[in-house]
Image: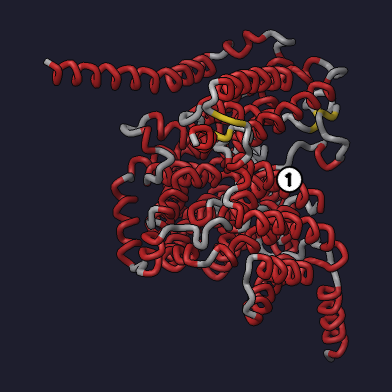
Amino acid sequence: MSSEQSSENKAPLGADLVIPALALAFAAYFFFSIADLAWEAKANGILIGTVLVLLIAIHLVRTVVQVAKRRADLGLAPLLEPRDALPRRIGLVLLTVVFIAAMPWLGLTLSLFLGLGAGLYLMGLRKRSHLIWTPFAVAASAYILFIAVLSSDFPHGPVENAVETLAGLFRAGRP
Amino acid sequence: MTWDFLVGQFATQFGLWWVIWPAILLGIVVGILPGFSPQNTLIMLLPLTLAVKVEVALAFMISLYCANHLAGGIPAILVKIPGSGGAAATTLDGYPMTQKGQAQQALVLCFTASVFGGLITTLATLALLPWLSQIGLVLRSVEMVVVMLFGLTLIAVIAAKDFLKGLIAGFFGLLIGVIGTDHIYNTPRATFGFLELYDGVPLVPALIGLFAISEALVMLEEKMIVGKEGQAKAVSAQWAGIIDGLRLSVKYWWQIIWTSFVGLFIGIVPGAGASIAAFVAYQQSRLWSKHPELYGTGIPEGVIAPEAANNGVTSGTLVPTLALGVPGGSTAAVMMIVLQYHGMVLGPRLFSTNPEVAYGVFVAMAVAYIFMIFTILPLARYMSRIVLIETTYLAPIIVLVTTVAAFGERQYAFDMALALVFGVIGYIAHKTHYHVTAILIGIILGPLFEQYLVRALRISQGDITILFSSTLGNVLWALLVLSLLLPLWRGWRQKKALAAEQFGEER
């Protein structure tokens, strides 16, 4: 009973170490990448990197002391809680990866329409009208602003090509 | 410059309302979206600005530019997603105000600080142009190193709650900011082999990832982004909220004025911009405040300072552009191209050869700000209702639309993936209380700091004492030390007073 209680009261400091671990790995890579450069190119990075490594070392010592005194453990709970949101969160990240990968083929408008429809479904929305009209409104707005008004270089897909062909036919048909 | 000339200029600009209004609306729409900076928009619209008369092109570009600076604060306040780097500091107090059910007041403060900050500095620029144009010459790399340090000390301020974590976040950001080729030999550093990182980490994907995507990933834990009290206030949003925001703006009029001048002076320095101005203004505002401990909890001063400063920058960046022919920023560079296309030779002679253009720029800016306040203020009531949209809708829309926006600045698909990577880093930072603003300050100011530092050291052939070689630089160093010592002295005085109080009670 008492061991259960003490484990509940322990602060999960493992999650706190993720950013320092990323920073440390990046600092190591940074030092490796600048090893052969002239001093002007590396002075600033070495200064910043060294301070960063020192700060991380202090943080590590602080964490080890907390764990040794049994006030904390190396749990990752803060990153994973609340558990019910985790599948949606991971799903949204994966969906974004697919969205980025598919945009060169599907074009801005269609990929945004499909991606957003899938995203809303993933969030638990089941009302068909909302699943269609919300992505349609957003994708149409994006088309109007980014492609029709600003003529920016977003990838073109079936929708953009079809609109361009229709516009071309319309222009050709005018006297 | 006579009064008749000025009155004529104002009359001309008011007559261009048909250009100014659409430009303001476009600037607001584009400014709300992170990733679409005014310079990108102006580049895309170059065919339009090159085809019309120079006065019309100027009115259009200036109105869009100013509206864009104002609009960046809107998503920063409502959903903690700054529309630009200059609005990143606005999230610190703007979003907490929204969470307290004061979104409408925060928006009004943002609008009034932006408009009046911009207007006051524009009029000041008109009056003091010959003197202000000298500032760009006086502030050299040595002085700029200290100005950058003013901004960087904000990391320590943000880190106040957990100093070690704050510093780790800030230095992590600074190291990320060093990615890219160095300023002397152009050798790549820590680019992971990606050519897209040779110019350094692009600000827009970092901003979108750290703020927008990470915030969306966090917000889906709750049904709404504000609590029940905030929802009730948003539902019953009345014009009284706007009037209350205006009352607060009047109450903090002096704050608007002095922080907008911080923006003006920083804007004059070529290369410095709205981000550094907003961070420095926020840091200075907190430093001189009677209640610095309340900053970050959602107070009006925390919204006013960065917003007034980032709009104070708008007139500042145009000073070196017109007076010296040196663009004060990337948007000013685009405007320079348009002016040169129309046959204007920029530099001191512009004021005698084409005064209607040289002074007309600032008159156009003043008129744009006047139009802007009447356009945007009534919208605050309706904008504040965005907090009533369920996170089921908001989260996927924010993630996908801002990922698209990440493409906007450089038109690289790589930047969308980079935004996602920063999104995951930002999410971890959010959940483990490493301040994402501290990371962003490092990413923004790191490269600028290095650029000025290396330039100064290069001039002195590595002699670090050059940093203390100018009078103005030394004055700035003294102010910087004062900025660092003042909070410590205040803390010590408060402790002493508390101890004396307790001693008195015991007796």
Chain name for mark 1: B
Furthest residue in direction front, as rendered: A1
Whether residue B42 appears in this view of the structure is no
Q: Coloring scheme of the render? A: secondary structure
In this rendering, is residue B258 above or below B507? below
Q: Nearer the viewer, residue B369 or A65?
A: A65
Furthest residue in direction left, as rendered: B507
Q: How many marks?
A: 1
Residue visible at 11% across and 15% down?
B507
Element at badge 1? helix
In the picture, residue B447 is in which quadrant? top right
Q: Nearer the viewer, residue B103 or B60?
A: B103
The location of residue B159, given as percent across then percent down, is 51, 30
In the picture, residue A116 is in which quadrant? bottom right
In this rendering, is residue A154 above or below B339? below
Residue visible at 30% across and 64% down?
B240
Which residue has dot 1 on it?
B421
Q: Could you tell me which quadrant the C terminus of chain A lies in?
A: bottom right
Left or right of residue B165, residue B329 in this image: right
Residue visible at 62% across and 79% down?
A127
Q: Nearer the viewer, residue B319 or B99?
A: B99
Whether residue B399 appears in this view of the structure is yes
The location of residue B48, given as percent across then percent down, is 71, 64
The location of residue A86, given as percent across then percent down, is 65, 54
Disc 1 residue crowd, few under 14, some 14–19, many 20+, Cα 10 Å: some
Q: What amino acid is at disc 1? A: Val
